[in-house]
Amino acid sequence: MSASAALGLRAAPSRGTNSTQAINAAAEEVRNEVLSAINAIERAASRKGNCCLTSPLLDPTPCLLTPMLLFLMTEKRDAFLGTICGTASLVLDSLTTYPLRLVRWRHQIIPSHLDIPTSQLFAQVLDGPRPQALWQGFWTRLVSEILCSFTEKQFLLLLPPPRSSLPLLLTYQLSLSAVSFLWNFPLHRASVLLGVQFDIFPTRRYFRGRIHCVLDYLTYFWPGITAVPPPLPNRLSLDVVATPSVAHYALRSLLFGLVGDFVFRRLARRSRRLAPAHQDGGAESSETVHARLLASFAGVVVSQFILFPLEMVSARLLVQGTGVLHPSAETDYTGFWDCVTKVAATEGYSAFYSGVGAMLTRFIISGIILEGIQVLQTAISARLTM
C-alpha cells in the first residue's frame, strides 16, 4: 500500500482504472479504521468523565496522539484547526488586553483616578522604571482562571447536574461556581494585589510575588506569620472580603452560560450547519466552533457589564488594609453596604461604572483578535483543502 493510501489522501490518476479504484478503496478502508480508533479513544475518555479533545489537563496521552490522527482526516481536521486557533486566540487576547484589566482595577479601586483618562494612566506606567508592570500578576491570574475551570469540571464529574427542574439547576450552577472560586480565592486575591501595586505609586507594603500574597492571605488564619509585614488596622475580615467576590464570580458564570446558550441557539437557527458536538458521532465543524466563540464573547460582555458595580465594590473591599495603595487612596469601609452607600453619596452613582471604558476597549480588541483568528483559520483550512 502506498504512503498516500496509508494516510487516506486522494491518489493521483493512474493509467488503469481498476488500480486507481483499488487504491482509493484501500485508502477509504484505512481512513475508516483510523476514524473508528479515534471514536473509540473518545468514548473511552468519555467513560472516564472527560473528553480527550477538550480536557488536555486530565489525560495528556490521548491528547498528544489524537490531534496527529485528526489532522489526517478531512472531517476531523477543521475541529483540530479550530482548537488550535481558539487556543491561540485565548493566549493572544490575554497578553494583549491584560494591561486594560489593570487600568480598570485602578479606576475602580482608587477614587482619585476616576478623572484620569486611560491613556494618561498608561503613559504614567510606560514612563516609569518598569513598563512591564502593566503585566504584573498576569501568570497568577491565568493560573487562577485555569484552576477555577479545572475545579468546576472535577465537581461536575463528582456531582452531575440535576435534571428535575430549572430552579434546582440554577441553584446547582451557582453553588458549583461559588465553591470552585472560593477554593481558588487566594490566587484571585493575589492577582488583584499584584496588578494594583504599580512601581511608580509609593505604597506602605509591597508584595514580591504570588507566594508573598498567599502568605499574607494565610495571616487571616495564622496572624503570627512573620514572612510578610503585618496588615493595616483597617483590613476587613475574610468573610466580608470574600463574599462579594464569590457572589460576583458565581453570578457572572451563570449569566455567561445563559447568554452564551441563548446566542448560540439564535445563531444555530440561522445556519443548519451548526450542530452540537458529537451529535452524529463526529466532531464540530469550524462554523460551529466559531459560533461558540461568538456566543462566549457575547456572554462575557453582557455578564461583565451587568455585574460591573458588584465587581467594583468587591475590589475595593479586597484591597482595603492590604497596604498596596497610596495612603491618600486608602479607604475606610466597614462592609459591603457601607461601601455602596458611601460611594453613592460621595462619588455619585456613575462611580460604580468607573473603568467601564477600559473594559469596553478590551472587548473591542478581543473582538478584533477573534475575527482575525477566524479569518486566519479559514485561510489555512482553504489552503489545506487545495
Image (cartoon, helix red, strand yellow):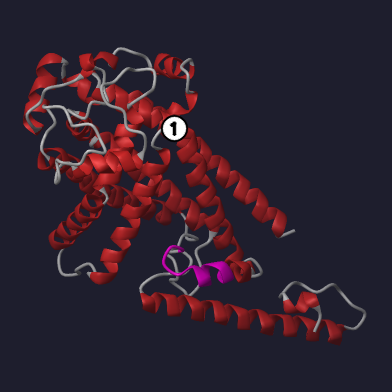
Q: Which quadrant holds the N terminus? A: bottom right
Residue at 37 percent across and 43 percent down: it is 140
Q: Residue 58 is drawn in which quadrant?
A: bottom left
Q: Which range is magenta?
A: 56-66
- When the figure is inspected, residue 280 is found, relative to residue 344, above or below; the finding is below
Q: Can residue 53 be seen in this snapshot?
A: yes
In the displayed structure, does residue 60 sit left or right of residue 246? right
Indicate whether residue 301 is drawn in magenta: no
Q: Can residue 355 be seen in this snapshot?
A: no
Residue at 39 percent across and 70 percent down: it is 50
- When the figure is inspected, residue 206 is found, relative to residue 74, above or below; the finding is above
Q: State the residue in front, 354 or 385.
A: 354
Residue at 34 percent across and 41 percent down: it is 210
Q: State the residue in front, 136 or 33.
A: 136
- When the figure is inspected, residue 284 is found, relative to residue 200, above or below; the finding is below
Counting from the top left corner in percent of width and height, residue 337 is at: 7, 31
Find disc 1 in the rendering and name its residue: 135
Indicate whether residue 57 is drawn in magenta: yes
Q: State the residue in front, 36 or 14.
A: 36
Counting from the top left corner in percent of width and height, residue 108 is at: 26, 25
In the displayed structure, does residue 243 sit left or right of residue 88? left
In the displayed structure, does residue 304 sit left or right of residue 4? left
Identify the element where label 1 is drawn.
helix
Counting from the top left corner in percent of width and height, residue 156 is at: 27, 66
Counting from the top left corner in percent of width and height, residue 100 is at: 40, 28
Residue at 68 percent across and 82 percent down: it is 30
Q: Residue 34 is drawn in which quadrant?
A: bottom right
* Magenta stretch: dominant secondary structure: helix
- The amino acid beneath tag 1 is Trp
